[in-house]
Amino acid sequence: LRLVDGASDEEERAAELALRPKSLDEFIGQERVRDQLGLVLDAAKGRGRPADHILLSGGPGLGKTTLAMIVAAEMEAPLRISSGPAITHAGDLAAVLSSLAEGEVLFLDEVHRMARPAEEMLYMAMEDFRVDVVVGKGPGATAIPLDLPHFTLIGATTRAGLLPAPLRDRFGFTAHMDLYEPAELERVLARSARLLGIDLRKDGGREVALRSRGTPRIANRLLRRVRDFAEVRAKGVVTGPVAAAALEIYEVDALGLDRLDRAVLTALVKLFGGGPVGLSTLAVAVGEEAETVEVVAEPFLVRAGLLARTPRGRIATPAAWAHLGLAPPGADRV
Ligand code: ADP
């Protein structure tokens, strides 16, 4: 796992447990989502009914699972966690749905990656709290209707546009989660430092926040690495220079780019004069699969305004040249 990847593994999930905000008030940033979600939950509580189905869209590590846990806690309801890829048959979904308690919150991560027949079953479950379980095969197959408890589905997806319209339309509330501002990440870091007993100074927090790619999970991960360094080399005090020195060792630069990101930019600029160059050519130049470059490195480079995808190939923006400490071609002609 890359240090600057938004996704997590099992081990990290365990380390994160202590850091998860437990209420909407503790959840930092995403002001609009928080306000809207607060209203949805208050209205549901007022009516004494489970909340409407909720769709959360946004990249990995932005707090979707955390929000699902908060919704369950605020509704005083149990929470079940599953994911689209884990549901490969309609039967898998029927088993989950039929075992829910009344009012339970079901969190389905990567809801856009569910098997098709399961997705169709989910439409009916969301709308009518009912499914048809098909028993048998061929002409003798019969559909047995099954009533379900009223539940709240929280679907998570990296992009709402990935969902088929009939599924998207069945969510009563859709929230888009943006990348966090550095100031918000500083607050996330200050809170985590307090919980973990880390002596994080203001400038230390700022340094880590700027390198965290707008993502709380990455911020918390970098904080753990910086703590290691500070304990060994700086008596446990995380100042700006200490954080910068630590992250230099882990090859996370001032913009949060890691070695792969920088290799892509450097090849683009130094070998291809800033482009345009085709994806596969660029990938060969950095010794990676085209897919790795496209899926792992490019999204953040594009978002950071360092790389652009054009019909003729990838190009480096003037900001990319500047970040590498080079002058873009033609700059001397001005
Ligand atoms: P996702 O489900 O979107 O991948 P998570 O909900 O698992 O993201 O969040 C990743 C980690 O980041 C959590 O452990 C949590 O501690 C932290 N985190 C996410 N959002 C926030 C936030 N708004 N405030 C504080 N911490 C957050």
Image (spheres, grey):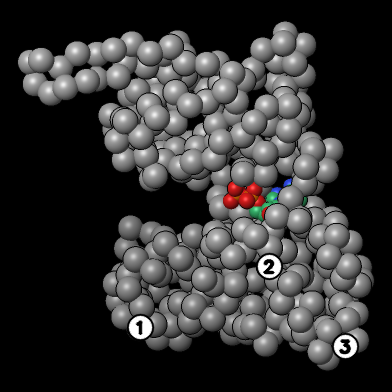
Question: Residue 287: which numbered mark, if any?
Answer: 1
Could you tell me which residue is drawn at 72 percent across and 36 percent down? 70
Label placed on residue 316: none
Q: Earlier in the sequence, mark 1 or mark 3?
A: 3
Image point (74%, 72%), residue name? 224
The residue under label 2 is 221
Residue type at the position of mark 1: Gly
Circle 1 packing at 10 Å, graded few (<14), some (14-19), many (20+), is few
Q: Is the CB of the residue bearing disc 3 within 8 angstroms of ligand 1?
A: no
Q: Earlier in the sequence, mark 2 or mark 3?
A: 2
Q: In this orientation, does residue 175 appear?
A: no
Q: Residue furthest left?
A: 139
- In the displayed structure, 330 sits above or below 134; it is below
Q: Amino acid at mark 2?
A: Arg
Front-most of 56 and 15?
Answer: 15
Q: Which residue is mark 3?
A: 234
For the residue labelled by badge 2, is the local secondary structure a helix, a strand or a loop? helix
User: Does 292 appear above or below 229?
Assistant: above
Q: Secondary structure at mark 1?
A: loop
Q: Residue 169 at x, y = what percent?
A: 46, 20
Sequence-first tag of 1 and 2: 2
Disc 1 to disc 3, how far (Cα)? 37 Å
User: Residue 185: x, y in percent?
Assistant: 77, 57
Res 316 visible: yes
Give me the C-alpha separation between circle 2 and circle 3: 19 Å
Q: Amino acid at mark 3?
A: Ala
Q: Quarter-wise, where is residue 17 in the image?
A: bottom right
